[in-house]
Image (spheres, rainbow, N blue to C red):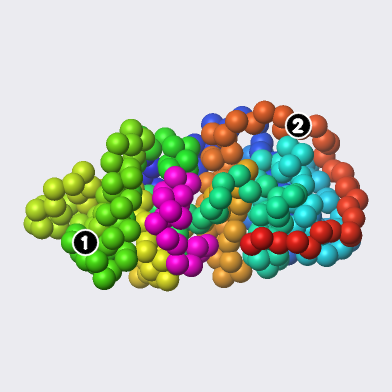
Amino acid sequence: MLHDFQELEQKIGNIKEPKKVAVVKAANEHALESIFELANEGVVIPFLIDSQSEIEDLISKMDMKNTTYHIVDVSSDQEAAYKGVELVRENKVHFIMKGNIQTGTLLKEVVHRETGIREKDVLSHLALIDVPAYPKLIGVTDGGMLLTPNVDQKQAMIENALEVMRALNYHHPKFAVLSATEVVQPKLPASTDADELTKRFKESEDCVVEGPISLDVALRPSIATEKGYQGEINGDADVLVASDVVAGNTLSKSMLLLANGTMAGIILGAQVPIVLTSRSSSTLEKRYSLLLALQISHAQKEEGVNEDGGSYSIYKSWSNINETCIF
């Protein structure tokens, strides 16, 4: 269990070999600053995918100290996304970071039927949030990917998030499937989905999944006791499972804006983690999202990753890319 992001920082200190990250459309000052901060600390080696001349122009204005990086020279957003995915397929990078590119353009290549890196049927988003008023990091899924997930997709969301919690050394994490109350109401899909998910995970030896459960019971022990809640989650949930993207997004942002929280966000379900922050994300959010991807990558098997390369190199790419998309 992690109490805050400072403990995540300490975990990264245990990683002896730097992880390789594909930064898709990297010719952006904020993207370069966030990735080079970690590169200078020796924990990542960036593969900067964008126009070579634009990247070099930006780097010339930065304070670089013998930092290892690679430039992947491309001429379009689609080409950049394709190349980032290809580097994953060829086991040359451990995870992807979205730079100055539309999310849909990147994910189109991730889920491409023939050349993509989709590993599971469902891609989902997990926000890991550090709220001062809560004694440990709290996960929220899904506030950024699936719009109105059905019960099968919610099961996949939980399974995706479970892999992250394992990577963070959570033992038997608790998933609270949120609704308005603890009562199953046939006309309220959030409650019936929660009841079904509870049944599906009842025999699980890996995690606790309970619902329907209200937010106060999930997060405040005194309220769980006062309401006489009989489940295993008593104000100590590890992950909150939202009913839809509006609920998940609102919940996450309320923690950030009203409770002074900080967040790490990541897309799960591909062969590697995908760091996908917005342009409005703070520097800390970008850093913590990268650290989360680093920890997940560290926990995954790393067979076949090419560890060669010097301090600087240039890769030429191509322009004829299949535009078929299933996203």
Q: Which residues are magenta?
A: 144-160
Q: Quadrant of residue 203?
A: top left
Identify the residue shown where x is 79% and y is 52%: 83
Q: Earlier in the sequence, mark 2 or mark 1?
A: 1
Q: Residues within 10 Å of mark 1 (few under 14, many from 20)?
A: some
Q: Nearer the viewer, mark 2 or mark 1?
A: 1
Q: Which residue is mark 2?
A: 307
Label 2, label 1: how many angstroms apart (C-alpha)? Answer: 53 Å
Q: Which residue is mark 1?
A: 184
Q: Nearer the viewer, residue 96 or 44?
A: 96
Q: Quadrant of residue 192?
A: bottom left
**Taking 294 as reference, is 232 left or right?**
left
The correct choice, above or below, for 244 with respect to 88 in the image is below
Identify the residue shown where x is 55% and y is 54%: 123
* Secondary structure category for the residue under label 1: loop
Quadrant for the C terminus in the image: bottom right
What residue type is disc 2 on? Glu
Quadrant for the N terminus in the image: top left
**Taking 298 as reference, is 194 left or right?**
left
Instruction: State the image coordinates of residue 318 (x, y, percent, origin top left).
Output: 90, 55
What residue type is disc 1 on? Val
Instruction: State the image coordinates of residue 7 (x, y, percent, origin top left).
Output: 43, 42
As drawn, the label of residue 46 is none
Instruction: State the image coordinates of residue 140 (x, y, percent, origin top left).
Output: 40, 57
